[in-house]
Amino acid sequence: MLRRWLIAAVVALISIPTQSTLTVHAQGPTTEDVKRLSVLVDIRESVIRSIGAAPETVDVSMTGKVLTVARINSNLNRSSHAGRDNEAKAIARIVFEFIFGKPEFGGLVAIRVQYEMRSVIFRRTHILVVDTVNFRAGPDGRFQFDQT
């Protein structure tokens, strides 16, 4: 019995340095991340004011090199593509005004305005993308309406 305890103690002592060297230290957000998040919040508020949308119908996010403005359960979901294009162009202008010249958005290649129908069924959110309007970065840094 004592022998088992002794073996277990030796194994535990040997493994302690190994475990401590494998500890991963979490990194906090960088100042660039904080600035980017602040601008995304400002974009959302400006879009809400400019197009007269309810706060719960606008979401702004950035994944990789694409900034997405989601229009959630918008009345334009039942509209024509041309109607959504017009609103998306206004939204893209607002986004461009906020991000132009800011280094944290320097690598951005597209602005996407996505019209979604969201619903919650059995505590799970379901998203149906109705339409997506893209704006691609041109060589001059301005975003052009993508008609593909």
Image (cartoon, grey):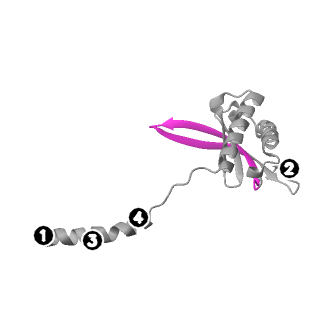
The earlier-in-sequence mark between 4 and 1 is 1
Q: Which segment did they paint magenta?
A: 107-132
Closest to the observer, 47 or 82: 47
**Does the CB distance between marks 3 and 4 fall below 8 Å?**
no
Q: Which residue does the numbered mark 1 point to in the structure image? A: 2
Crowding at mark 2 (Cα within 10 Å: few <14, some 14-19, many 20+): some
User: What x and y, as percent, mark residue 83?
Assistant: 78, 35
SS assignment at label 1: helix
Task: Give the quarter of the figure containing the N terminus.
Answer: bottom left
Q: Main secondary structure of the magenta part?
A: strand
Question: Dot 4, crowdedness within 10 Å: few (<14), some or many (≥20)?
Answer: few
Residue name at image x 41 percent, y 64 percent: 20
User: Is the residue under label 2 in contact with that under label 3 (CB below 8 Å)?
Assistant: no
Q: Is residue 31 left or right of residue 85?
A: left
Cα–Cα span, label 2 and label 1: 75 Å
Q: Secondary structure at mark 2?
A: loop
Residue type highlighted by circle 1: Leu
- The residue where tag 4 is placed is 20
Q: Amino acid at mark 4?
A: Ser
Q: Nearer the viewer, residue 86 or 98?
A: 98
In percent of the image, x 81 and y 43: which residue is there? 96
Q: Please give the residue where the numbered disc 2 appears in the rendered image.
A: 142
